[in-house]
Amino acid sequence: MSTHKVKVFTRFERFWHWTQMALIFTLLFSGAGIHGFHHLMNFETLVWVHVISALALIVLWVFAIFWHLTTGNWRHYMPTTDGLFKVARYYAFGIFKGEDHPYRKRFWHKHNPLQAVSYLFLKVALFPLLWITGLAYLLYGFWGQGALTAGSLESVAVIHTAAAFAMAVFIVIHVYLLTTGHSTVEHIKPMITGYDEVDLTPEEEAYLEQDEPGRIV
């Protein structure tokens, strides 16, 4: 394999990433205010901001799911044990000893095995849990009056809040990892420009040079 700078993050992918980040931070901020952790805005405004941001994020997720399925980018999130334990060991011990990262980005595997597992968990478990419980809370008046569902709003709220805390923990870990290894700027730059250093097979290099020359430097 040879290393080249390749556009691995498309324009939509970068738009989706940064818009999602802004909406999630808005939701965490407004949700914390609704729970009384701060009083920077009045309660009614916080609820309005939270609901609008949540609906916008759901719409974004729907488009992102469609994009991943139609472009084949879902392959980057397929979990594998190949190299998983090496990467886990690196983050647990090796990173503190100055060892090199054991994973090199490849054209169809731009996420390392640990990233792929983490992102897949977010997409198939945590995000849907936030989505479902949030909508259930918002629409409680339509389903919460039955004999079996009366009084269940508290349970929905607890699950939604727990999932939000899990999301906050993921963000803290994600931001921390941006400060490790290469400089923080080098970690963030690919999600701004789209280009990153990737190991290419001769076949992948030939394909890009012939069919998508604008993606390879």
Image (cartoon, grey):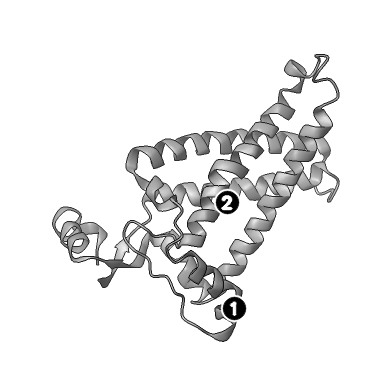
What is the x, y in percent for residue 71? Answer: 33, 42
- Residue 41 seen by the camera: no
Q: Which residue is mark 2?
A: 21
What is the x, y in percent for residue 215? Answer: 26, 58
Q: Quadrant of the N terminus?
A: bottom left
Q: Is residue 186 above or below residue 214?
A: below
* Residue drawn at (18%, 61%) of the image: 203
In the visual, does 174 lie left or right of 210?
Answer: right
Q: Quadrant of the C terminus?
A: bottom left
Nearer to me, 198 or 121: 121
Secondary element type, mark 1: loop
- Residue 203 seen by the camera: yes
Q: Amino acid at mark 2?
A: Met
Q: Which residue is mark 1?
A: 93
Q: Residue furthest top?
A: 146
Q: Is residue 49 above or below residue 208?
A: above
How many other residues sit within 10 Å of disc 1, few (<14), some (14-19) or many (≥20)?
few
Nearer to me, 130 or 33: 130
- Say whether disc 2 or disc 1 marks the residue closer to the N-terminus: 2
